[in-house]
Image (cartoon, grey):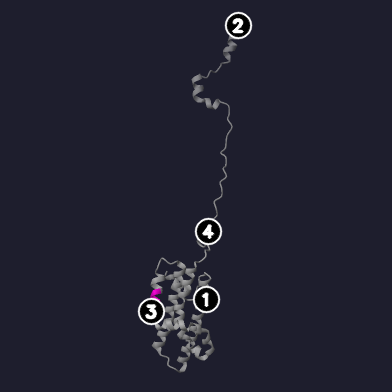
Amino acid sequence: MASSIALLHLSATPKTLIPKSYVCSSFPSSTLAAPRSISFPQLVKRKPKPKSNITCMSSYNNNNTTTPTPATDRLISAVAYTLPFFNSLQYGRYLFFQFPKLGLLFEPLIPLLSLYRSMPYSSFVAFFALYLGVVRNPSFSHYVRFNAMQAVTLDVLLVLPLLIQRIFSPGRAGLGYKLMVWGHNGIFVFSVFCFLYSVVSSILGRTPYLPFVADAAARQL
């Protein structure tokens, strides 16, 4: 009797059995393994890119390195400005007549000027020799070509007042004559200033920039 009661007691508490195949298929072995530590990707510090202003400064220094100008380039540049200077002396005749002592400053140039004027078509020959032989010659440096082109441009500008004078013919009296005298005096002073400034700058190896002339000369190169 006691054994039957114990058997009934065991049968009253059913025991649920889970198939082994179901356990293996529903819960993979990886989930049943011991938990692993989660690793996060490490942040790698990148080097900052160089700023743009540093690159600009280096390129500016490379393109504008101060190199001494050769002596031959200085000499050719200084001689080139004698062409417009010799052609501008005719504008100073009114100042020489009004101030005779002013002509004493230009007396050392008289022998050289006489030799220049003694040659036939000396102005045209010097103009084309300077333009074709120096400005358009790539064998010369940019420094020499720019100065030669600036001298040629100034020489061309000095011809324009003579053409205007021949067209209007102001005469030898009246307001037109006074305007012509003032214009000649101003052109002569301006040309002398350009000559001295250009020659001194060329001897020192610097680039002279003449007003109203430098921009026109730079566009031709």
Helix, strand or loop under label 4: helix
- Of badges 4 and 3, the one in the foreground is 3
Helix, strand or loop under label 1: helix
- Whichever of callouts 4 and 1 sits on the residue coming sooner in the sequence is 4
Q: Mark 3: give few (<14), some (14-19) or many (20+) Cα within 10 Å.
A: few
Which residue is outermost to the top? 1
Q: Mark 2: give few (<14), some (14-19) or many (20+) Cα within 10 Å.
A: few
Q: Amino acid at mark 1?
A: Tyr
Find the magenta span and give its range: 122-129
| Left or right of residue 124: residue 198 | right
Q: CA distance from mark 4 to mark 1?
A: 33 Å
**Can residue 217 be seen by looking at this rendering?**
yes
Q: Mark 4: give few (<14), some (14-19) or many (20+) Cα within 10 Å.
A: few
- Whichever of callouts 2 and 1 sits on the residue coming sooner in the sequence is 2
The answer to whether the residues at label 2 and label 1 have Cβ atoms under 8 Å apart is no
Q: Which mark is residue 56?
A: 4
Q: Amino acid at mark 2?
A: Ser
Residue highlighted by disc 2: 3
- Location of residue 72 in the rendering, given as x and y in whole percent from the top left corner: 47, 69
Q: Amino acid at mark 4?
A: Cys
- Location of residue 133 in the rendering, given as x and y in whole percent from the top left corner: 39, 71
Residue highlighted by disc 3: 124
| Closer to us: 132 or 105 | 105
Q: CA distance from mark 2 to mark 1?
A: 136 Å
- Of badges 2 and 4, the one in the foreground is 4
- Of badges 2 and 3, the one in the foreground is 3
- Location of residue 31 in the rendering, given as x and y in whole percent from the top left corner: 54, 27
Residue positioned 52% across, 58% down in the render? 56
